[in-house]
Image: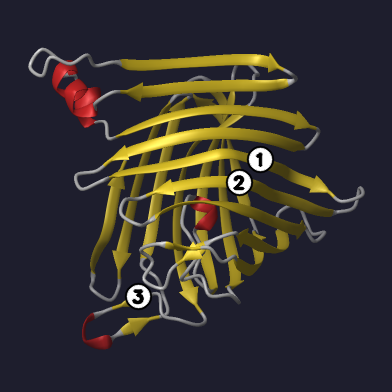
Amino acid sequence: DRENEEAEWKVFGRHRQEDFLGFNLLAQLENLSDIDFWQDFDRSFDANTRRDLYSFAYLTRNFGPYALNLRVDHRQTFLSSTNVVLSQLPEIELRSGSTPIFNSPIYLNLISSLSYLRVDRGGDLKSSYGRADVFPALSYTIPSPPWLSITPRIGGRATYYTQQYAADRRSFVDEPIERIYATGAVDIVGPSFSRIFEGGLGRYDKVKHLVEPRIEYLYLTTPTDVALIPIFDQVDSTPKDANLVRMVLANRLLGRDREGVGTRELGSLEIYQDFSFDDPLNFGDGGVTSQWSPLGVALRVTPKPGTGFDGRVSYDFLYKNLRSTSLA
């Protein structure tokens, strides 16, 4: 830095290793002496729009349907008023996909972790604390015709923190706190209808159009007060109590490759809307409310691997206008 006659430095690196003591290893190091200097010196689009640095070491190993993950990371986010530092030192996570319990038709999904976390959000809002989290869920698909699927699910999440927020949420208090919530759901898919078009389309010799109505019921309750739960990542995000149903009409277009390498989805069009049995989902002028959510439409087109189009529209019946639009 010739203006200030100081030496500045930057170090960026990545490493991948498929067998490190039986684990797959991915590591990244990002650090620099002064982000303001480097953004002025580099003058590239990436440097001038970047607002964080992220270093981590990630180890993962599979044991049948289970995955053991070990993570150490350090993230610095540069804001106009202060810098935010979030670190996991470390996190140990055990996950499982859908796994039958003792060869039964009941399936288990599990997310669990032990973490030691360090937070510095500026001022007095900084501390180091431990967190233990377990989130099991059970599902069972009721025997039914192939064109109909009914799957009830139940689950619950329990999280323990060695510290909690103070009443003003501007500092930490050295007192443990627990968060517990339960979930229940039923997914009904069908009756489904399909038609196969011979002759194909482009590289696909057969194209299948599938009409698939779905009903997804969700019940969620939080028996504990979560106002003082310290927020670090998505594990700490507590969904609101819910007693609602989502209705979906899905159209899917599938193609079978002429080379015989399999079938893939070419596109889908979904129309969906939620209805709440408890709290209103929509609020209009003059205190008018509705148990119905805005109507959503999602269009996804994937003509070939690596290329995709995603468009979404949400229409609000209370205001009689578009609530949101997106295109990717």
Q: Nearer the viewer, mark 2 or mark 3?
A: 2
Q: Secondary structure at mark 3?
A: strand
Question: Residue at coordinates 59% horizontally, 59% vertically from top-left?
Answer: 162
Q: For label 3, count other residues whose C-alpha is less than 10 Å away and answer few (under 14), some (14-19) or many (20+).
A: some
- Residue found at the very far left of the displayed protein: 3
Mark with earlier residue (1, 2)? 1
- Residue 125, relative to residue 3: is it above or below? below
Q: Secondary structure at mark 1?
A: strand
**Residue picked out by circle 1:** 92
Give the color scheme: rainbow, by chain, secondary structure or one colour: secondary structure
Image coordinates of residue 246 in percent, x first then y, are: 52, 66
| Label ID, residue 115 | 2
**Residue picked out by circle 3:** 282
Q: Amino acid at mark 1?
A: Ile
Distance between the alpha carbons at the discs numbered 3 and 1: 40 Å
Q: Nearer the viewer, mark 3 or mark 1?
A: 1
